[in-house]
Image (cartoon, rainbow, N blue to C red):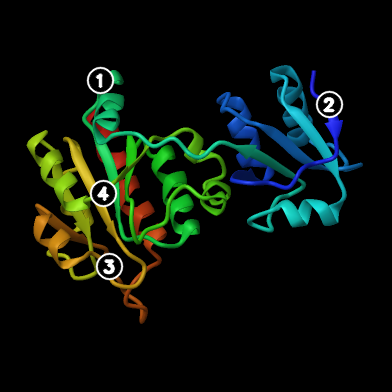
Amino acid sequence: MSRFSRAKKVHGQTVEGRRAVLESLRVKRDIERLIMLEDSELGPQLREIVFLATEAGIRIDAVSRRELESQSQTKKHQGVIAVVPDPRYHQPDDLLSAAGLKGEHPLLVMLDGIQDPHNLGAIARTAEAAGVHGLIIAERRAVGVTPGAMRASAGALEHIKVSRVGNLNRTVENLKENGLTIVGLDAAGDSEYTQIDFTGPVLVVVGSEGKGLSRLMRDNCDQVASIPMAGQISSLNVSVSAAIVLYEAFNQRSKAG
């Protein structure tokens, strides 16, 4: 039975926002406690959050709006925060195994230097919906699974495996040895994305917000795909580009069965 009490100051990781917290509860993530706005009107999502937390024996701290704001790391909490342990990352082999368990060719996404948590969250949301088996990110000079990324993913980061590696290019070489084709996304790519075959084992590499693919990563790609543009803007937001290409992969793989 959950109980309502005064919240202690948050130290560590949080999941914030109704959808993100709800998905964390649905997948039975380890949650230390919930912090909720006192006297808030319980709509369908908050009612389910309270029900699932109570059922799981998770403590619920009811606090004032001022205190909730002080506890929030994203400032977009929607009246509820889950305090959780640090995120659990996986090995790249775990991502390949996830595909194997489904009897599918691996479809992975690597983020080459993405630093904005909102972009990571948005890409994770699309990737989960498009049947991607996992994301690969860098340990250094790149965003990790932060509260902002969790919220932007609308709970998708609870459903997709994330691998955090020390060397992206070495990981690419290992994945090539496992039979994956490496497809980079770049405005100056040599093939339009619709001309790429995504039906086999594929790693899609998305470059950083400002610089795109690094030179060495581009050299390591088997193919570099571009998205044709008809307007005056020369490029799209990285998460939008990833969404367009991942749904092309989804469509191809759906038709191939």
Mark 3 and 1 residues: CB-CB less than 8 Å, in contact?
Answer: no
**Which label sits in the foreground, 3 or 2?**
2
Amino acid type, label 2: Arg
Disc 1 versus disc 4: distance between alpha carbons? 29 Å
Of the image marks 2 and 4, the number of the one nearer the N terminus: 2
Residue that carries the numbered disc 2 in the rendered image: 3
Marker disc for residue 163: none
Of the image marks 1 and 4, the number of the one nearer the N terminus: 1
Kindly state the secondary structure of the residue where label 4 is placed: loop
For the N terminus, the quadrant is top right
Mark 3 and 2 residues: CB-CB less than 8 Å, in contact?
Answer: no
Mark 2 and 1 residues: CB-CB less than 8 Å, in contact?
Answer: no
Closer to us: 160 or 127: 160
Using the rendered image of the protein, determine whether residue 191 is visible from the camera's viewpoint. no
Q: Using the rendered view, name the quadrant where residue 130 is placed.
A: top left
Residue that carries the numbered disc 4 in the rendered image: 166
Label 2 packing within 10 angstroms: few (<14), some (14-19), many (20+)? few
Amino acid type, label 1: Gly
Residue that carries the numbered disc 1 in the rendered image: 103
**Which label sits in the foreground, 3 or 1?**
3
Disc 3 versus disc 4: distance between alpha carbons? 19 Å
Using the rendered image of the protein, determine whether residue 88 is visible from the camera's viewpoint. yes
Label 4 packing within 10 angstroms: few (<14), some (14-19), many (20+)? few
Disc 2 versus disc 1: distance between alpha carbons? 44 Å
Residue that carries the numbered disc 3 in the rendered image: 212
Amino acid type, label 3: Gly
